[in-house]
C-alpha cells in the first residue's frame, strides 16, 4: 500500500517510534509559531530551559490576539516578546502585521515541512501541504529547543472531493459540511486529508479555510496535497523556491473515506453554541440579525475580503446592523486599500478593524444583548463573543455580506449566478515584510524588557503519592477551554497566573476560583468532573496552569480532547477517563475523594483507582508511557530540565 500525504511527511520527520497507528511517535519540528496570548508563557518557559537559541529552521512570534493595549499589560507583553525574541533567534511579527495563521501561510509556510504552533488553528498550514499542529505553549517551547513533538500516530480520514463548488457556495460551507458529518467529538488521533479530483478546483486560501476550521473536529490536523495550485500561490508570494510537490500515492492507504461532491454543497451555518450544530441556510433564512463580522484566521484572505467588497459595492449595509470587517494581514489590508475595495467597504457602512483576531476572541465588538450575530470565524461557543446572551452563527463571507445588506439572514442561492463575484488569486501579492523583525545575529545580545505584567513561569512539584480533596465542580459534555479559562476582557492577564486564575470557570461558577484556592490552602485538593470531549477548542495552556495553581489535581471525564489533555499532563494534572461512563451519574459536586499509592499506580498500573464518596472507582489514565514520567516529575518543564 502506498502513502498518503500525511504519512509521507511524517516518514520524513520521524525521530522516535514506529509509524503504527495508535502508537506514540516523536517527530522533528521544522518551524514553530506562537501568538501573544500563549507566547509570553511559552517564551518564559523556553528561557527557563536555559537553551541559548532556537534550534528550529524557523520560529516566528506573532502579536495578533490582544492588540488593543487597554492599560499597560498588553504593551508590556508585546515588548517582552519583541526583546526576548531578538535574543533567542526568533522572528517577531508586530501588532498590526496580521493574524498568525494568515501571515504564516503567506510568508513562511512550506509544503512538506512540519509546523508546531501554540494555537489550535495552526493546521491552517495544511492548506499548502504542511503537517501543521496546534499544541500548548510549553510543547512549542520544547520543539524550539530541538526536542521532538510527541503525538499519536494517526488514522487518516480521506475526504474525497469531486465536482466543483457552485457560484455563491464557498470553502466555509465545505468545512461546515465536514463538521456536520464528523462532528466535534470522537476524532482524537485522526488526521483529515483532502483527496480526489475536486482538490484542484480549490485555491490555497480556500484550502486554508478548510484546514483552519478543521481544528473544530478535534483532529490532530488536516492537510491538502501540494500541487500546481500551491505552486502558483507561493510564486505569487515571491516564494516559488519554497514549493515542492507532495501528492498521495495512487494506492495510498486511508482508514476511512468520506465522499464529498462539491457541486452538492449548500450554503450552511453553524448555529449556537457549537461549530458542529450545522444547518442549511435555506432552513434559517429570514432570521433578523443584529451584527455581521467578516474576518478571523478562517475567512480574512484577499479573496474573502474582495468577495465581500464586490457584493457591497454601491450598496449600503442595513441601518440596524453593526457591520465589522477585519483584514487578516497587512498584505490583505494593503491590497484592498490599493485597489479601492476598502473604499467600497467603508462607503457601504463597514467598521474597519485592525488586522488582528479582535472580535473572534471577544476582544472588542461584543454584540448587543440577545443579539443574533453572523460571523465568518470558526468558534461560536457560549459567551466567547463577550455577550453571554448572544447567539453566534458561523457563515461564509458571501452569506455574511449579502445578509448585512438585507438586515436578515439570506440564502446566497436565491441570488442570480451571474451576480457572483469571481475573485482570482492575484499573480503577485503585495509584499512588504517590514513589520516582521529579524532576530539579532548569533552572539549579539540586548536587554530583555520585563514590565510589571510579566510574571514568573509557573512552578509545579512532583506528583504526590496521596491526594485528598473534593469534587469541586460537575460539568456536562463538550466543556471548552473557553468555559475553563475565558479570554476576551481577561486576556490581558495571560502573563500573570495568580491574577488570571481568579477567573477559572468564571462563567460556569463565579465562586469556583475563590473556594478552590482556599481549599488548597487547607490542603484540600480539587477534582473536576466532566462529560464527553472535555477541553475542546483552544490550545491555551492556561486552562491547565490556572486550575493547577488553584489546586486542581485530577479531572474525571468520559473523554478528553487531545491538546487539553496534553496540557493537563504537562502541568501535573491527571486526565482520568471513567472505565464505566455510567459512574459519571453517580458522582456529585462536593463528594470527597482520596487517591492513594498514586505514584506507584501511575508508574505501574494500566488503570488508576480513586476512592470517591467511600467507594472505589476505576479510571483509565489518558497518558502514554512518556507522559506518565512527565506526570511523576510534576510536569513537562521539570521533565525537560532533568532530561537536557
Ligand atoms: C482561540 O481561537 O481560541 C485562540 C485564542 O486562538 C486560542 C489560543 C488562545 O487561547 O490563546 C487557540 O485557538 O488555541
Ligand atoms: Fe485568532 Fe480567532 Fe484565529 Fe484564534 S480563531 S487565532 S482568536 S482569529
Image (cartoon, helix red, strand yellow):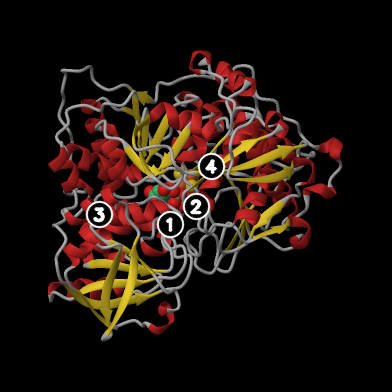
**Residue named by callout 4:** 212
| Mark toward the start of the polypeptide (4 vs 2) | 4
Instruction: Give the residue at x 76% y 60%.
Output: 285
Q: Nearer the viewer, residue 259 or 271?
A: 259
Is label 4 within 8 A of ligand 2 (CB to nearest ligand atom)? Answer: yes
Q: In the visual, does 347 lie left or right of 619?
A: right
**Residue named by callout 2:** 218
Q: CA distance from mark 3 to mark 1?
A: 18 Å
| Mark toward the start of the polypeptide (3 vs 1) | 1
Q: In the visual, does 72 lie left or right of 248?
A: left
Q: CA distance from mark 4 to mark 1?
A: 17 Å
Quadrant showing the C terminus? top left
Residue 556 occupies quadrant: bottom left
Is label 3 within 8 A of ligand 1 (CB to nearest ligand atom)? Answer: no
Secondary structure under badge 2? Answer: loop
* Circle 1/circle 2 CB separation < 8 Å: yes
- Look at the picture and state if 611 lies above or below 229: below
**Residue named by callout 3:** 628
Q: In the visual, does 339 lie left or right of 642?
A: right
* Circle 4/circle 2 CB separation < 8 Å: no
The x, y position of residue 273, in whole percent, is 56, 64
Which numbered disc, 4 or 2, marks the residue closer to the eye? 2
Instruction: Give the residue at x 56% y 61%.
Output: 274
Secondary structure under badge 3? Answer: helix
| Mark toward the start of the polypeptide (2 vs 3) | 2
Amino acid at each position: 500500500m502506498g502513502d498518503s500525504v500525511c504519512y509521507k511527511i511524517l516518514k520524513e520527520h520521524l525521530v522516535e517510534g514506529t509509524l503504527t497507528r495508535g502508537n506514540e511517535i516523536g517527530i522533528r519540528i521544522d518551524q514553530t509559531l506562537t501568538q501573544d496570548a500563549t507566547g509570553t508563557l511559552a517564551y518564559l518557559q523556553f528561557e527557563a530551559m536555559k537553551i541559548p537559541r532556537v534550534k528550529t529552521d524557523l520560529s516566528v512570534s506573532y502579536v495578533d490576539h490582544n492588540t488593543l493595549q487597554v492599560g499597560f499589560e498588553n504593551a508590556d507583553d508585546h515588548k517582552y516578546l519583541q526583546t526576548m525574541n531578538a535574543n533567542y533567534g526568533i522572528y517577531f511579527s508586530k501588532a498590526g502585521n496580521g493574524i498568525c495563521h494568515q501571515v504564516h501561510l503567506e510568508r513562511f509556510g512550506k509544503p512538506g515541512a512540519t509546523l508546531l504552533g501554540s494555537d489550535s488553528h495552526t493546521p491552517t498550514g495544511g492548506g499548502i501541504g504542511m503537517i501543521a499542529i496546534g499544541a500548548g505553549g510549553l510543547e512549542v517551547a520544547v520543539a524550539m529547543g530541538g526536542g521532538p513533538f510527541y503525538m499519536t500516530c494517526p488514522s487518516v480520514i480521506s475526504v474525497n472531493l469531486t465536482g466543483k463548488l457552485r457560484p455563491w457556495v464557498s470553502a466555509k460551507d465545505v468545512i461546515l459540511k465536514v463538521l456536520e458529518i464528523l462532528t466535534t467529538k470522537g476524532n482524537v488521533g485522526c488526521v483529515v486529508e483532502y483527496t480526489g479530483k475536486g482538490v484542484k478546483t480549490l485555491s490555497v486560501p480556500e484550502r486554508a479555510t478548510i484546514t483552519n476550521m478543521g481544528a473544530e473536529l478535534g483532529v490532530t490536523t488536516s492537510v491538502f496535497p501540494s500541487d500546481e495550485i500551491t505552486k502558483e500561490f507561493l510564486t505569487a508570494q515571491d516564494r516559488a523556491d519554497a514549493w515542492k510537490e507532495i501528492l498521495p500515492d495512487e494506492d495510498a492507504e486511508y482508514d476511512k473515506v468520506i465522499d464529498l461532491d462539491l457541486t452538492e454543497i449548500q450554503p450552511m451555518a453553524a448555529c449556537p453554541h457549537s461549530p458542529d450544530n450545522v444547518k442549511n441556510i435555506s432552513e434559517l433564512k429570514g432570521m433578523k440579525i443584529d451584527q455581521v463580522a467578516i474576518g478571523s484566521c478562517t475567512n480574512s484572505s484577499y479573496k474573502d475580503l474582495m468577495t465581500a467588497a464586490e457584493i457591497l459595492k454601491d450598496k449600503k449595509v442595513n441601518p440596524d446592523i453593526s457591520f465589522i470587517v477585519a483584514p487578516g494581514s497587512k498584505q490583505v489590508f494593503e491590497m484592498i486599500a490599493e485597489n479601492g475595495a476598502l473604499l467600497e467597504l467603508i462607503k457601504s457602512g463597514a467598521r474597519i478593524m485592525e488586522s488582528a483576531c479582535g472580535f473572534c476572541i471577544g476582544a472588542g465588538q461584543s454584540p448587543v444583548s440577545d443579539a443574533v450575530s453572523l460571523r465568518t470565524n470558526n468558534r461560536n461557543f457560549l459567551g466567547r463573543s463577550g455577550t453571554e446572551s448572544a447567539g453566534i452563527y458561523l457563515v461564509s463571507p458571501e452569506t455574511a455580506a449579502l445578509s448585512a445588506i438585507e438586515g436578515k439572514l439570506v440564502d446566497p442561492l436565491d441570488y442570480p449566478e451571474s451576480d457572483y463575484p469571481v475573485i482570482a488569486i492575484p499573480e503577485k501579492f503585495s509584499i512588504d515584510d517590514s513589520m516582521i523583525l529579524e532576530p539579532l545575529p548569533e552572539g549579539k545580545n540586548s536587554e530583555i524588557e520585563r514590565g510589571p505584567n510579566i510574571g514568573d513561569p509557573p512552578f509545579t512539584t512532583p506528583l504526590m503519592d496521596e491526594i485528598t480533596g473534593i469534587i469541586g465542580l460537575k460539568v456536562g459534555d463538550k466543556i471548552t477551554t473557553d468555559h475553563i479559562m475565558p479570554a476576551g476582557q481577561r486576556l490581558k492577564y495571560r502573563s500573570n497566573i495568580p491574577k488570571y486564575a481568579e477567573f477559572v470557570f468564571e462563567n460556569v461558577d463565579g465562586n469556583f476560583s475563590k473556594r478552590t484556592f482556599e481549599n488548597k490552602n487547607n490542603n484540600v485538593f480539587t477534582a473536576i468532573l466532566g462529560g464527553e470531549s472535555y477541553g475542546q477548542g483552544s490550545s491555551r495552556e492556561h486552562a491547565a496552569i490556572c486550575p493547577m495553581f488553584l489546586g486542581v489535581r485530577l479531572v474525571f471525564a468520559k473523554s478528553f480532547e487531545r491538546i487539553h489533555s496534553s496540557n493537563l499532563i504537562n502541568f501535573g494534572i491527571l486526565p482520568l477517563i471513567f472505565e464505566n461512563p455510567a459512574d459519571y451519574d453517580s458522582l456529585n459536586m462536593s463528594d470527597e475523594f482520596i487517591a492513594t499509592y498514586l505514584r506507584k499506580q501511575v508508574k505501574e498500573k494500566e488503570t488508576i483507582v480513586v476512592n470517591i464518596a467511600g467507594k472505589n472507582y476505576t479510571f483509565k489514565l489518558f497518558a502514554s508511557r512518556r507522559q506518565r514520567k512527565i506526570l511523576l516529575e510534576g510536569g513537562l518543564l521539570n521533565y525537560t530540565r532533568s532530561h537536557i
